[in-house]
Amino acid sequence: MIAERMAVKSPPSNTQTHTSGVIQFKQINCVTFPLPLHMSEQQLLKPDEWSYCDYFWADRKDPQGSANISGFEVLLQKQLKGRQMQKEMAEFVRERIRIEEEYAKNLSKLSQIPLAAQEEGTLGEAWSQLKKSLADEAEVHLKFSSKLQSEVEKPLLIFRENFKKDMKKFDHHMADLRKQLASRNAAVEKARKALADRQKDLDLKTQQLEIKLNSKIEEDIKKARRKSTQAGDELMRCVDLYNQSQSKWFEEMVTSSLELERLEVERVEMIRQHLCQYTTLRHETDMFNQSTIEPVDKLLRSVDPATDRELWVKEHKTGELRPVDMDI
C-alpha cells in the first residue's frame, strides 16, 4: 500500500479551485470534485445501502504519518483487519480445543483412579457407573475437540488463503490509476501555464502595436496568436486525457469497492456460519454428556440402604444365634 500512499501524497498546496463558465470545481490530490454549491446535483449510486462505492472517494490523513491515504486504501485496511480478526478467531478456537483435550485427558485419568473401589451394594454399583461416566464424558469431549478442529478452526484458517495476494493486486491496480491521474493532472497544469504565458506574450505584443505600428510587430503578433491557439489546443487535449483517466479511475473505484463489499459480506457470513456450527456442536456435547450421566441417575435412584444391608449381612454374617442368660 506504500505505492498508493506515494501516489496520493501531495505538496502543501494540494487544493485548487477552478471556474470555467458555469462549472465550478476544486481539485484535491489531483482528483476533481464539485464545489459545495453543486454537490446537491450528485445522487448516491446506491441510496439507503451505505455502500462502499458511495463514501470513500476522498483521501484522508494517515493517523500514523503525514501522508494521505486514499479512500480505497481505507477499504483495503478494513479487509486486512477482517482477515486478521478471522485468524485470531481461529487461534481462539484452537485454544478452546486444547482446553477440551486437556479436560478429556484429566477426566479419563480420574475415571481410572481406584478410589472407593471397595464400595458395595447398590451404592457401589452407582459409584462404579459414575466413574465410568467420566470415561464416557472424556470420549464426548475428545469428539467435540476433533469436530471443532475440522468444522470450525480449519475452515477459518484456510478461507481465502491467497487473500493478501489478492488485496495487493487491488492495491497496485488502483495505485497505478492514481499515478496516471496525477501525471495527467500535471500535464494539464503545465499546459494551462503554457497557455497563460502565450496569452501574456500576445497581450504584450498587442500593446506594443498599439503604441507603435510596425510590420515586424504585426508578424510577431501573428506568431504569438498562432502559438496561443496551439497552447489552447494542447490544454484541451491534456484536459481530455485527464478526464479519460479520471473516468477510468472512477469506474474501477466503483467496481473494486463493490467487490470488496461483496468479499466483506462473504467473510462475515462465513464466520457466522462456522460460529453457529460451534454452538451446534456445543449443544450436541451437552446432550451427549447428559446421556452419560443418565445411567448414573438411574442407579442413584435405585440406591437402597436396606437392600445394601441385606446383601452385606448375607455375605458377612457371623452367626444368627443370640446370647441367653446362664442357668445355675
Image: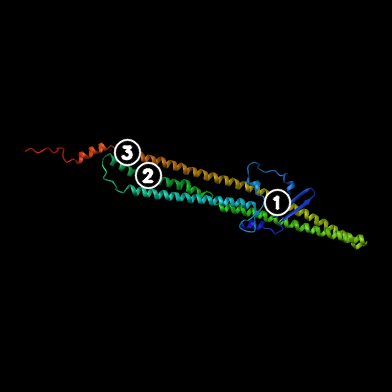
- Image side of residue 4 versus residue 143, left or right: right
Residue 246: image tag:
1
Which structural element holds mark 2? helix
Q: Nearer the viewer, mark 1 or mark 2?
A: 2
Q: What type is the residue that disc 3 sits on?
A: Leu
Q: What type is the residue that disc 2 sits on?
A: Glu
Residue at numbered disc 3: 300
Residue in the foreground of this view, choosing between 122 and 231: 122
Which structural element holds mark 3? helix
Which structural element holds mark 1? helix
Q: Would you call the spot at circle 1 few (<14 residues within 10 Å), some (14-19), or many (20 or more)? A: many
Pinpoint residue 320: horizontal percent, then vertical percent.
16, 37
Q: What type is the residue that disc 1 sits on?
A: Gln
Pinpoint residue 259: horizontal percent, then vertical percent.
61, 47
Q: CA distance from mark 2 to mark 3?
A: 18 Å
Mark 2 vs mark 3: which is more N-terminal?
Answer: 2
Residue at numbered disc 2: 137
Image point (57%, 53%), residue name: 165
Total residue callouts:
3
